[in-house]
Image (cartoon, coloured by chain):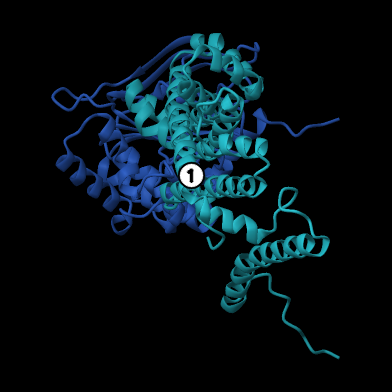
Chain colours: A cyan, B blue
Amino acid sequence: MNELQAPPSAELGATDRFTLRLFRLLLPVVVLAAAVAGWAILVRVNDIPPYVLPGPGAVWRTLISDWPILWQSLLTTLSTTLEGFCAAAIGGIALALVFNQSKWLEYSLFPYAVILQVTPVIAIAPLLLIYLPQQTAVIACAWIVGFFPVLSNTTLGLNSVDRNLAGLFRLYGASRLQTLRYLKLPAALPYILGGLRIAGGLSLIGAVVAEIAAGSAGAGSGLAYRIAESGYRLNIPRMFAALLLLSAAGIVIYGLLALTSHLALRRWHESALGGEN
Amino acid sequence: MIPISKSPSAVPALAVSLRGVTKVYDSGVAALGPLDLDVARGEFVSLLGPSGCGKSTALRMIAGLNTPTTGSVGVARRKAGTRAAPAIGFVFQEPTLMPWATVQDNVGLPLKLARTAADEAKARIEQALAQVGLADFAGAFPRELSGGMRMRVSLARALVTDPDILLMDEPFAALDEITRFRLNNDLLALWRDLRKTVIFVTHSVFESVYLSQRVIVMTARPGRIGAAITIDAAEPRSEAFRTSADYVAYCRTVSNALAPSYPEPTR
Protein backbone atom coordinates (compact mmCIF):
# COMPACT_ATOMS: atom_id res chain seq x y z
CA MET A 1 0.00 0.00 0.00
CA ASN A 2 2.67 2.47 0.93
CA GLU A 3 5.13 1.05 -1.51
CA LEU A 4 6.88 3.93 -3.20
CA GLN A 5 8.01 3.74 -6.75
CA ALA A 6 10.89 5.60 -8.32
CA PRO A 7 9.54 8.20 -10.73
CA PRO A 8 9.84 7.08 -14.33
CA SER A 9 13.14 8.43 -15.54
CA ALA A 10 13.22 10.47 -18.68
CA GLU A 11 16.93 9.83 -19.00
CA LEU A 12 18.02 6.83 -20.99
CA GLY A 13 20.53 4.30 -19.74
CA ALA A 14 23.65 3.50 -21.74
CA THR A 15 22.24 0.28 -23.20
CA ASP A 16 18.98 1.99 -24.07
CA ARG A 17 20.86 4.72 -25.90
CA PHE A 18 22.85 2.13 -27.85
CA THR A 19 19.68 0.28 -28.84
CA LEU A 20 18.07 3.54 -29.89
CA ARG A 21 21.03 4.44 -32.07
CA LEU A 22 21.03 0.96 -33.62
CA PHE A 23 17.34 1.31 -34.43
CA ARG A 24 17.86 4.70 -36.00
CA LEU A 25 20.41 3.16 -38.34
CA LEU A 26 18.56 -0.07 -38.89
CA LEU A 27 15.01 1.10 -39.51
CA PRO A 28 15.68 3.07 -42.73
CA VAL A 29 17.65 0.10 -44.05
CA VAL A 30 14.74 -2.22 -43.28
CA VAL A 31 12.35 0.16 -45.05
CA LEU A 32 14.66 0.29 -48.08
CA ALA A 33 14.96 -3.50 -48.23
CA ALA A 34 11.17 -3.89 -47.98
CA ALA A 35 10.58 -1.33 -50.73
CA VAL A 36 13.11 -2.97 -53.07
CA ALA A 37 11.60 -6.43 -52.38
CA GLY A 38 8.07 -5.09 -52.96
CA TRP A 39 9.25 -3.50 -56.22
CA ALA A 40 10.84 -6.78 -57.39
CA ILE A 41 7.73 -8.80 -56.49
CA LEU A 42 5.42 -6.28 -58.20
CA VAL A 43 7.40 -6.47 -61.43
CA ARG A 44 7.67 -10.29 -61.27
CA VAL A 45 4.02 -11.01 -60.37
CA ASN A 46 2.51 -8.62 -62.93
CA ASP A 47 5.09 -9.55 -65.53
CA ILE A 48 5.78 -5.87 -66.29
CA PRO A 49 8.13 -5.46 -69.28
CA PRO A 50 11.46 -3.67 -68.50
CA TYR A 51 10.65 -0.77 -70.90
CA VAL A 52 7.73 0.12 -68.64
CA LEU A 53 9.16 -0.67 -65.23
CA PRO A 54 12.44 -2.58 -64.85
CA GLY A 55 12.93 -4.64 -61.68
CA PRO A 56 15.69 -3.73 -59.23
CA GLY A 57 17.83 -6.54 -60.62
CA ALA A 58 17.65 -5.14 -64.14
CA VAL A 59 18.56 -1.66 -62.88
CA TRP A 60 21.53 -3.07 -60.98
CA ARG A 61 22.75 -5.03 -64.03
CA THR A 62 22.47 -1.89 -66.18
CA LEU A 63 24.35 0.11 -63.59
CA ILE A 64 27.23 -2.36 -63.86
CA SER A 65 27.17 -2.91 -67.63
CA ASP A 66 26.80 0.84 -68.44
CA TRP A 67 29.19 1.91 -65.72
CA PRO A 68 31.82 3.49 -68.05
CA ILE A 69 29.20 5.79 -69.63
CA LEU A 70 27.40 6.53 -66.38
CA TRP A 71 30.65 7.19 -64.50
CA GLN A 72 31.73 9.76 -67.09
CA SER A 73 28.33 11.43 -66.88
CA LEU A 74 28.44 11.42 -63.10
CA LEU A 75 31.83 13.14 -63.16
CA THR A 76 30.51 15.76 -65.58
CA THR A 77 27.47 16.52 -63.42
CA LEU A 78 29.51 16.54 -60.23
CA SER A 79 32.08 18.94 -61.64
CA THR A 80 29.28 21.25 -62.82
CA THR A 81 27.68 21.05 -59.37
CA LEU A 82 30.97 21.69 -57.63
CA GLU A 83 31.79 24.72 -59.78
CA GLY A 84 28.29 26.12 -59.34
CA PHE A 85 28.45 25.47 -55.60
CA CYS A 86 31.83 27.17 -55.20
CA ALA A 87 30.65 30.16 -57.19
CA ALA A 88 27.48 30.30 -55.06
CA ALA A 89 29.44 30.01 -51.81
CA ILE A 90 32.05 32.61 -52.69
CA GLY A 91 29.55 34.94 -54.37
CA GLY A 92 26.95 34.61 -51.61
CA ILE A 93 29.36 35.19 -48.75
CA ALA A 94 31.19 38.01 -50.55
CA LEU A 95 27.98 39.82 -51.45
CA ALA A 96 26.67 39.43 -47.90
CA LEU A 97 29.90 40.98 -46.59
CA VAL A 98 29.56 43.88 -49.03
CA PHE A 99 25.91 44.36 -47.99
CA ASN A 100 26.97 44.31 -44.35
CA GLN A 101 29.53 47.07 -44.92
CA SER A 102 27.26 49.27 -47.02
CA LYS A 103 23.55 49.60 -46.35
CA TRP A 104 23.16 51.59 -49.59
CA LEU A 105 24.39 48.68 -51.68
CA GLU A 106 22.20 46.28 -49.73
CA TYR A 107 19.07 48.36 -50.30
CA SER A 108 19.93 48.77 -53.99
CA LEU A 109 20.76 45.18 -54.83
CA PHE A 110 18.99 42.86 -52.41
CA PRO A 111 15.61 42.98 -54.24
CA TYR A 112 17.32 41.74 -57.39
CA ALA A 113 18.88 38.85 -55.51
CA VAL A 114 15.36 37.95 -54.41
CA ILE A 115 14.04 38.21 -57.96
CA LEU A 116 16.83 35.93 -59.14
CA GLN A 117 15.79 33.45 -56.49
CA VAL A 118 12.02 33.46 -57.01
CA THR A 119 12.16 33.16 -60.80
CA PRO A 120 12.15 29.41 -61.48
CA VAL A 121 15.53 28.35 -62.80
CA ILE A 122 13.90 26.02 -65.33
CA ALA A 123 12.49 29.14 -66.97
CA ILE A 124 15.82 30.97 -67.01
CA ALA A 125 17.87 28.04 -68.25
CA PRO A 126 16.81 28.20 -71.93
CA LEU A 127 17.67 31.91 -72.03
CA LEU A 128 21.07 31.35 -70.47
CA LEU A 129 21.71 28.60 -73.01
CA ILE A 130 21.12 31.07 -75.80
CA TYR A 131 23.48 33.73 -74.50
CA LEU A 132 26.21 31.66 -72.87
CA PRO A 133 28.36 28.76 -74.03
CA GLN A 134 26.64 25.58 -72.90
CA GLN A 135 29.06 24.60 -70.11
CA THR A 136 29.04 28.13 -68.70
CA ALA A 137 25.25 28.27 -68.85
CA VAL A 138 24.93 25.01 -66.92
CA ILE A 139 27.29 26.27 -64.20
CA ALA A 140 25.41 29.58 -64.12
CA CYS A 141 22.17 27.69 -63.41
CA ALA A 142 23.79 25.74 -60.58
CA TRP A 143 25.10 29.05 -59.24
CA ILE A 144 21.76 30.90 -59.42
CA VAL A 145 19.88 28.38 -57.30
CA GLY A 146 22.68 27.85 -54.78
CA PHE A 147 23.57 31.49 -54.39
CA PHE A 148 20.56 32.87 -52.56
CA PRO A 149 20.50 30.60 -49.48
CA VAL A 150 24.16 31.44 -48.87
CA LEU A 151 23.52 35.16 -49.28
CA SER A 152 20.45 35.33 -47.08
CA ASN A 153 21.85 33.04 -44.38
CA THR A 154 25.16 34.90 -44.23
CA THR A 155 23.31 38.23 -44.06
CA LEU A 156 21.18 36.88 -41.23
CA GLY A 157 24.28 35.63 -39.42
CA LEU A 158 26.18 38.89 -39.78
CA ASN A 159 23.18 40.76 -38.37
CA SER A 160 22.79 38.36 -35.43
CA VAL A 161 25.85 39.56 -33.56
CA ASP A 162 25.33 40.05 -29.82
CA ARG A 163 24.68 43.76 -29.23
CA ASN A 164 26.82 43.95 -26.12
CA LEU A 165 29.72 42.15 -27.79
CA ALA A 166 29.52 44.68 -30.60
CA GLY A 167 29.60 47.43 -27.95
CA LEU A 168 32.64 45.82 -26.38
CA PHE A 169 34.46 45.86 -29.72
CA ARG A 170 33.61 49.56 -30.09
CA LEU A 171 34.79 50.28 -26.56
CA TYR A 172 38.18 48.78 -27.32
CA GLY A 173 38.44 50.70 -30.57
CA ALA A 174 38.24 47.73 -32.94
CA SER A 175 38.64 48.57 -36.62
CA ARG A 176 36.01 47.47 -39.15
CA LEU A 177 38.24 44.67 -40.32
CA GLN A 178 38.90 43.46 -36.77
CA THR A 179 35.18 43.51 -35.98
CA LEU A 180 34.50 41.52 -39.13
CA ARG A 181 37.24 38.99 -38.56
CA TYR A 182 36.99 38.42 -34.82
CA LEU A 183 33.29 39.06 -34.22
CA LYS A 184 30.98 39.02 -37.22
CA LEU A 185 32.40 36.12 -39.21
CA PRO A 186 32.69 33.70 -36.25
CA ALA A 187 29.20 34.70 -35.09
CA ALA A 188 27.84 34.13 -38.60
CA LEU A 189 29.65 30.83 -39.14
CA PRO A 190 26.77 28.54 -38.05
CA TYR A 191 24.41 30.42 -40.37
CA ILE A 192 26.89 30.34 -43.27
CA LEU A 193 27.35 26.59 -42.86
CA GLY A 194 23.57 26.13 -42.78
CA GLY A 195 23.31 28.10 -46.02
CA LEU A 196 26.04 26.03 -47.64
CA ARG A 197 24.25 22.82 -46.67
CA ILE A 198 21.15 23.98 -48.52
CA ALA A 199 23.20 25.33 -51.43
CA GLY A 200 24.95 21.97 -51.97
CA GLY A 201 21.74 20.14 -52.77
CA LEU A 202 20.34 23.06 -54.77
CA SER A 203 23.46 23.31 -56.93
CA LEU A 204 22.94 19.70 -57.97
CA ILE A 205 19.31 20.48 -58.82
CA GLY A 206 20.42 23.55 -60.80
CA ALA A 207 22.97 21.53 -62.73
CA VAL A 208 20.38 18.83 -63.53
CA VAL A 209 17.75 21.34 -64.62
CA ALA A 210 20.20 23.08 -66.93
CA GLU A 211 21.41 19.78 -68.40
CA ILE A 212 17.86 18.73 -69.15
CA ALA A 213 17.11 22.11 -70.72
CA ALA A 214 20.29 21.80 -72.76
CA GLY A 215 19.59 18.14 -73.53
CA SER A 216 17.79 18.77 -76.81
CA ALA A 217 20.66 20.99 -77.90
CA GLY A 218 22.82 17.90 -77.96
CA ALA A 219 26.37 18.23 -76.79
CA GLY A 220 25.83 17.61 -73.04
CA SER A 221 26.90 14.38 -71.39
CA GLY A 222 25.93 14.77 -67.72
CA LEU A 223 23.68 12.37 -65.82
CA ALA A 224 20.56 14.42 -66.48
CA TYR A 225 21.39 14.36 -70.18
CA ARG A 226 21.69 10.55 -69.92
CA ILE A 227 18.26 10.40 -68.31
CA ALA A 228 16.69 12.50 -71.06
CA GLU A 229 18.52 10.53 -73.76
CA SER A 230 17.54 7.16 -72.25
CA GLY A 231 13.96 8.36 -72.10
CA TYR A 232 13.92 9.07 -75.82
CA ARG A 233 15.41 5.63 -76.49
CA LEU A 234 13.06 3.87 -74.07
CA ASN A 235 16.14 2.58 -72.23
CA ILE A 236 14.26 2.71 -68.93
CA PRO A 237 16.72 0.61 -66.88
CA ARG A 238 19.49 3.09 -67.67
CA MET A 239 17.17 5.93 -66.72
CA PHE A 240 16.69 4.34 -63.33
CA ALA A 241 20.41 3.67 -62.95
CA ALA A 242 21.23 7.33 -63.71
CA LEU A 243 18.54 8.48 -61.31
CA LEU A 244 20.01 6.24 -58.62
CA LEU A 245 23.41 7.79 -59.13
CA LEU A 246 21.97 11.31 -58.93
CA SER A 247 20.30 10.52 -55.62
CA ALA A 248 23.48 8.98 -54.29
CA ALA A 249 25.44 12.07 -55.37
CA GLY A 250 22.93 14.31 -53.57
CA ILE A 251 23.16 12.26 -50.39
CA VAL A 252 26.97 12.30 -50.44
CA ILE A 253 27.04 16.09 -51.00
CA TYR A 254 24.65 16.65 -48.11
CA GLY A 255 26.59 14.27 -45.88
CA LEU A 256 29.92 15.95 -46.61
CA LEU A 257 28.55 19.41 -45.89
CA ALA A 258 26.84 18.25 -42.70
CA LEU A 259 30.10 16.67 -41.58
CA THR A 260 32.04 19.87 -42.33
CA SER A 261 29.50 21.86 -40.35
CA HIS A 262 29.73 19.46 -37.43
CA LEU A 263 33.53 19.52 -37.37
CA ALA A 264 33.66 23.31 -37.53
CA LEU A 265 31.11 23.87 -34.75
CA ARG A 266 31.56 20.90 -32.43
CA ARG A 267 33.54 22.79 -29.80
CA TRP A 268 31.03 25.55 -29.13
CA HIS A 269 27.74 25.66 -31.02
CA GLU A 270 24.53 24.20 -29.61
CA SER A 271 23.63 22.53 -32.89
CA ALA A 272 26.74 20.34 -32.77
CA LEU A 273 26.87 19.60 -29.07
CA GLY A 274 24.35 16.80 -28.69
CA GLY A 275 21.99 16.38 -25.75
CA GLU A 276 24.34 15.56 -22.89
CA ASN A 277 25.14 19.06 -21.71
CA MET B 1 15.49 64.49 5.26
CA ILE B 2 18.32 62.65 3.69
CA PRO B 3 21.64 64.45 3.67
CA ILE B 4 22.66 65.11 0.09
CA SER B 5 26.34 65.71 -0.38
CA LYS B 6 26.66 67.40 -3.74
CA SER B 7 30.44 67.18 -3.82
CA PRO B 8 33.09 65.76 -1.50
CA SER B 9 34.54 68.36 0.86
CA ALA B 10 38.18 67.61 0.11
CA VAL B 11 38.38 67.47 -3.67
CA PRO B 12 40.72 64.72 -4.86
CA ALA B 13 41.64 64.11 -8.50
CA LEU B 14 38.54 63.22 -10.50
CA ALA B 15 38.22 60.07 -12.57
CA VAL B 16 34.80 60.78 -14.01
CA SER B 17 32.79 63.97 -14.18
CA LEU B 18 29.28 64.36 -15.60
CA ARG B 19 27.91 67.87 -16.06
CA GLY B 20 24.24 68.50 -16.87
CA VAL B 21 23.99 65.25 -18.75
CA THR B 22 20.59 64.36 -20.21
CA LYS B 23 19.33 61.66 -22.49
CA VAL B 24 16.16 62.05 -24.51
CA TYR B 25 15.20 59.15 -26.74
CA ASP B 26 13.95 59.60 -30.28
CA SER B 27 10.46 58.79 -29.01
CA GLY B 28 10.66 61.96 -26.90
CA VAL B 29 10.95 60.10 -23.60
CA ALA B 30 13.33 61.86 -21.22
CA ALA B 31 15.30 58.99 -19.75
CA LEU B 32 17.99 60.76 -17.81
CA GLY B 33 19.00 63.93 -16.10
CA PRO B 34 20.05 66.54 -15.92
CA LEU B 35 22.71 64.65 -14.01
CA ASP B 36 25.82 65.98 -12.26
CA LEU B 37 28.19 63.40 -10.87
CA ASP B 38 31.83 63.45 -9.83
CA VAL B 39 33.74 60.31 -9.04
CA ALA B 40 37.19 60.56 -7.49
CA ARG B 41 40.13 58.43 -8.52
CA GLY B 42 40.11 55.14 -6.65
CA GLU B 43 36.57 55.60 -5.38
CA PHE B 44 33.96 52.82 -5.35
CA VAL B 45 30.57 54.32 -6.23
CA SER B 46 27.27 52.53 -6.75
CA LEU B 47 24.40 53.83 -8.84
CA LEU B 48 21.26 52.40 -7.26
CA GLY B 49 17.76 52.36 -8.64
CA PRO B 50 15.20 49.99 -10.13
CA SER B 51 15.15 49.03 -13.78
CA GLY B 52 14.48 51.87 -16.18
CA CYS B 53 15.87 54.74 -14.11
CA GLY B 54 18.65 55.45 -16.60
CA LYS B 55 21.54 54.25 -14.47
CA SER B 56 22.77 51.86 -17.16
CA THR B 57 22.42 54.62 -19.73
CA ALA B 58 24.60 56.87 -17.57
CA LEU B 59 27.20 54.11 -17.32
CA ARG B 60 27.18 53.48 -21.05
CA MET B 61 27.71 57.22 -21.63
CA ILE B 62 30.80 57.18 -19.43
CA ALA B 63 32.07 54.25 -21.52
CA GLY B 64 31.30 56.16 -24.71
CA LEU B 65 28.79 53.52 -25.85
CA ASN B 66 25.94 56.06 -25.74
CA THR B 67 26.13 59.79 -26.36
CA PRO B 68 24.33 62.28 -24.12
CA THR B 69 21.63 64.46 -25.68
CA THR B 70 23.02 67.46 -23.82
CA GLY B 71 25.75 68.01 -21.24
CA SER B 72 29.30 66.78 -21.06
CA VAL B 73 31.01 63.60 -19.94
CA GLY B 74 34.58 63.90 -18.73
CA VAL B 75 36.74 60.83 -18.21
CA ALA B 76 40.31 61.10 -16.89
CA ARG B 77 42.92 60.04 -19.41
CA ARG B 78 45.65 57.73 -18.34
CA LYS B 79 48.52 59.13 -16.33
CA ALA B 80 51.18 60.44 -18.67
CA GLY B 81 53.69 57.87 -19.83
CA THR B 82 51.38 54.88 -19.66
CA ARG B 83 49.88 53.05 -22.59
CA ALA B 84 47.39 54.73 -24.85
CA ALA B 85 44.92 51.83 -24.58
CA PRO B 86 41.44 52.76 -23.28
CA ALA B 87 41.43 53.62 -19.60
CA ILE B 88 38.05 51.93 -19.13
CA GLY B 89 37.04 48.33 -18.46
CA PHE B 90 33.37 47.43 -18.85
CA VAL B 91 31.49 44.48 -17.36
CA PHE B 92 28.04 43.87 -18.80
CA GLN B 93 25.00 42.41 -17.10
CA GLU B 94 25.52 39.18 -19.00
CA PRO B 95 29.01 37.72 -19.27
CA THR B 96 28.98 38.68 -22.99
CA LEU B 97 31.65 36.17 -23.97
CA MET B 98 32.39 34.93 -27.46
CA PRO B 99 31.10 31.32 -27.38
CA TRP B 100 33.52 30.24 -30.12
CA ALA B 101 36.62 31.35 -28.22
CA THR B 102 38.36 29.81 -25.22
CA VAL B 103 38.58 31.60 -21.89
CA GLN B 104 42.07 32.91 -22.61
CA ASP B 105 41.07 34.15 -26.06
CA ASN B 106 38.05 35.89 -24.57
CA VAL B 107 40.14 37.53 -21.87
CA GLY B 108 42.83 38.46 -24.40
CA LEU B 109 40.39 40.10 -26.82
CA PRO B 110 41.08 43.73 -25.75
CA LEU B 111 44.82 43.08 -26.13
CA LYS B 112 44.36 41.50 -29.54
CA LEU B 113 42.30 44.47 -30.70
CA ALA B 114 45.06 46.79 -29.43
CA ARG B 115 47.62 44.64 -31.31
CA THR B 116 49.60 43.85 -28.16
CA ALA B 117 52.68 41.66 -28.68
CA ALA B 118 51.86 37.97 -28.18
CA ASP B 119 54.20 37.24 -25.27
CA GLU B 120 53.15 40.34 -23.35
CA ALA B 121 49.50 39.48 -23.98
CA LYS B 122 50.06 35.96 -22.70
CA ALA B 123 51.56 37.19 -19.44
CA ARG B 124 48.75 39.71 -18.90
CA ILE B 125 46.05 37.15 -19.65
CA GLU B 126 47.59 34.78 -17.11
CA GLN B 127 47.73 37.57 -14.55
CA ALA B 128 44.11 38.61 -15.14
CA LEU B 129 42.90 35.00 -14.90
CA ALA B 130 44.86 34.54 -11.67
CA GLN B 131 43.26 37.70 -10.25
CA VAL B 132 39.79 36.23 -10.66
CA GLY B 133 40.83 32.72 -9.62
CA LEU B 134 40.44 31.05 -13.01
CA ALA B 135 44.08 30.25 -13.77
CA ASP B 136 43.22 26.59 -14.42
CA PHE B 137 40.47 27.27 -16.92
CA ALA B 138 42.38 29.12 -19.65
CA GLY B 139 41.60 26.47 -22.29
CA ALA B 140 37.92 25.97 -21.44
CA PHE B 141 35.04 27.20 -23.57
CA PRO B 142 32.42 29.50 -22.00
CA ARG B 143 29.68 26.87 -22.24
CA GLU B 144 31.74 24.57 -20.02
CA LEU B 145 31.69 27.09 -17.16
CA SER B 146 29.06 27.97 -14.56
CA GLY B 147 27.34 31.36 -14.56
CA GLY B 148 29.60 32.68 -11.79
CA MET B 149 32.74 31.53 -13.58
CA ARG B 150 31.60 33.16 -16.83
CA MET B 151 31.16 36.41 -14.93
CA ARG B 152 34.69 36.02 -13.58
CA VAL B 153 35.97 35.62 -17.15
CA SER B 154 34.12 38.80 -18.06
CA LEU B 155 35.75 40.56 -15.10
CA ALA B 156 39.19 39.26 -16.11
CA ARG B 157 38.63 40.62 -19.61
CA ALA B 158 37.84 44.04 -18.13
CA LEU B 159 40.98 43.91 -15.97
CA VAL B 160 43.38 42.67 -18.64
CA THR B 161 44.11 46.12 -20.04
CA ASP B 162 44.82 47.35 -16.49
CA PRO B 163 42.21 50.12 -16.80
CA ASP B 164 41.99 53.03 -14.36
CA ILE B 165 38.20 52.89 -14.32
CA LEU B 166 36.02 49.82 -14.03
CA LEU B 167 32.39 50.22 -15.09
CA MET B 168 30.06 47.44 -14.00
CA ASP B 169 26.46 47.22 -15.21
CA GLU B 170 24.49 45.00 -12.79
CA PRO B 171 27.16 42.36 -13.26
CA PHE B 172 25.94 39.90 -10.64
CA ALA B 173 22.17 40.42 -11.01
CA ALA B 174 21.59 37.10 -12.75
CA LEU B 175 23.59 35.01 -10.29
CA ASP B 176 22.35 33.08 -7.28
CA GLU B 177 22.89 34.72 -3.91
CA ILE B 178 25.71 32.45 -2.72
CA THR B 179 27.71 33.04 -5.88
CA ARG B 180 26.92 36.73 -5.75
CA PHE B 181 28.23 37.06 -2.17
CA ARG B 182 31.46 35.33 -3.13
CA LEU B 183 31.92 37.56 -6.15
CA ASN B 184 31.15 40.62 -4.00
CA ASN B 185 33.94 39.63 -1.61
CA ASP B 186 36.36 38.90 -4.45
CA LEU B 187 35.54 42.21 -6.11
CA LEU B 188 36.18 44.09 -2.86
CA ALA B 189 39.52 42.30 -2.46
CA LEU B 190 40.48 43.19 -6.04
CA TRP B 191 39.49 46.80 -5.49
CA ARG B 192 41.62 46.98 -2.33
CA ASP B 193 44.61 45.50 -4.18
CA LEU B 194 44.32 47.39 -7.45
CA ARG B 195 42.75 50.66 -6.25
CA LYS B 196 40.79 51.23 -9.42
CA THR B 197 37.89 53.62 -9.71
CA VAL B 198 34.75 51.47 -9.77
CA ILE B 199 31.29 52.63 -10.83
CA PHE B 200 28.87 49.85 -10.05
CA VAL B 201 25.28 49.85 -11.25
CA THR B 202 22.90 47.70 -9.22
CA HIS B 203 19.29 47.43 -8.13
CA SER B 204 20.18 45.72 -4.88
CA VAL B 205 20.27 47.96 -1.79
CA PHE B 206 22.25 45.32 0.10
CA GLU B 207 24.85 44.90 -2.60
CA SER B 208 25.36 48.65 -3.00
CA VAL B 209 25.84 49.21 0.74
CA TYR B 210 28.16 46.25 1.11
CA LEU B 211 30.45 47.23 -1.74
CA SER B 212 30.61 50.97 -2.08
CA GLN B 213 32.07 54.01 -0.39
CA ARG B 214 29.23 56.08 -1.80
CA VAL B 215 25.74 55.07 -2.91
CA ILE B 216 24.03 57.32 -5.45
CA VAL B 217 20.28 56.74 -5.25
CA MET B 218 18.54 57.60 -8.51
CA THR B 219 14.95 58.65 -9.13
CA ALA B 220 12.87 57.33 -12.00
CA ARG B 221 12.13 58.88 -15.40
CA PRO B 222 13.93 61.05 -15.96
CA GLY B 223 16.77 59.57 -13.89
CA ARG B 224 18.20 62.09 -11.46
CA ILE B 225 20.25 61.85 -8.31
CA GLY B 226 17.82 61.52 -5.40
CA ALA B 227 20.41 61.13 -2.68
CA ALA B 228 24.08 60.39 -2.21
CA ILE B 229 24.93 58.42 0.89
CA THR B 230 28.46 57.87 2.08
CA ILE B 231 29.02 54.42 3.56
CA ASP B 232 31.65 54.96 6.22
CA ALA B 233 32.51 51.45 7.34
CA ALA B 234 35.78 50.08 8.70
CA GLU B 235 38.05 48.63 6.03
CA PRO B 236 38.61 45.96 5.04
CA ARG B 237 34.98 44.96 4.80
CA SER B 238 34.18 41.28 5.14
CA GLU B 239 31.30 38.93 5.90
CA ALA B 240 31.29 40.38 9.45
CA PHE B 241 30.21 43.74 8.03
CA ARG B 242 27.32 42.06 6.24
CA THR B 243 25.81 41.03 9.60
CA SER B 244 26.71 44.15 11.60
CA ALA B 245 24.26 46.69 12.98
CA ASP B 246 26.01 49.43 10.98
CA TYR B 247 25.28 47.56 7.78
CA VAL B 248 21.61 47.18 8.64
CA ALA B 249 21.37 50.88 9.54
CA TYR B 250 22.95 51.91 6.24
CA CYS B 251 20.63 49.58 4.34
CA ARG B 252 17.65 51.20 6.07
CA THR B 253 18.92 54.70 5.25
CA VAL B 254 19.43 53.78 1.60
CA SER B 255 16.06 52.04 1.37
CA ASN B 256 14.37 55.11 2.85
CA ALA B 257 16.16 57.31 0.35
CA LEU B 258 14.92 55.07 -2.43
CA ALA B 259 11.30 54.96 -1.22
CA PRO B 260 10.04 58.52 -1.98
CA SER B 261 11.12 58.24 -5.61
CA TYR B 262 9.12 55.08 -6.12
CA PRO B 263 5.76 55.35 -4.34
CA GLU B 264 3.60 52.25 -4.22
CA PRO B 265 1.05 52.42 -6.99
CA THR B 266 -2.30 53.54 -5.58
CA ARG B 267 -5.70 53.57 -7.14
**Other residues around mark 1 within 10 Å, as few (<14) / some (14–19) / many (≥20):** some
Side of A28 where A276 appears, left or right: left
The residue positioned farthest toward the left in the image shown: B81
Q: Position of residue B160 (x, y in %)?
A: 27, 40
**Quarter of the image where the C terminus of chain B is located:** top right
**Quarter of the image where the N terminus of chain B is located:** top right
Q: Quadrant of residue A207?
A: top right
Task: Depth check: give the residue in front, B62 or A195.
Answer: A195
Task: Depth check: give the residue in front, A85 or B63.
Answer: A85
- Asked if residue B234 shows in the view, the reply is no
* Figure label count: 1
Chain ID, mark 1: A
Tell me if residue A12 comes above or below residue B113 in the rendering: below
Residue at 44% of width from left, 28% of height from top?
Answer: A166
Task: Depth check: give the residue in front, B54 or A203.
Answer: A203
Q: Position of residue A145 (x, y in %)?
A: 57, 27
Tell me if residue B126 comes above or below residue B61 in the rendering: below
- Asked if residue B185 shows in the view, the reply is yes
Residue type at numbered disc 1:
Ile
Residue at 35% of width from left, 42% of height from top?
Answer: B106
Residue at 46% of width from left, 21% of height from top?
Answer: A136
- Residue corresponding to mark 1: A69
**Could you say whether the residue bearing mark 1 is in a helix, strand or loop?**
helix
Task: Depth check: give the residue in front, B255 or B2.
Answer: B255
Residue at 44% of width from left, 27% of height from top?
Answer: A87
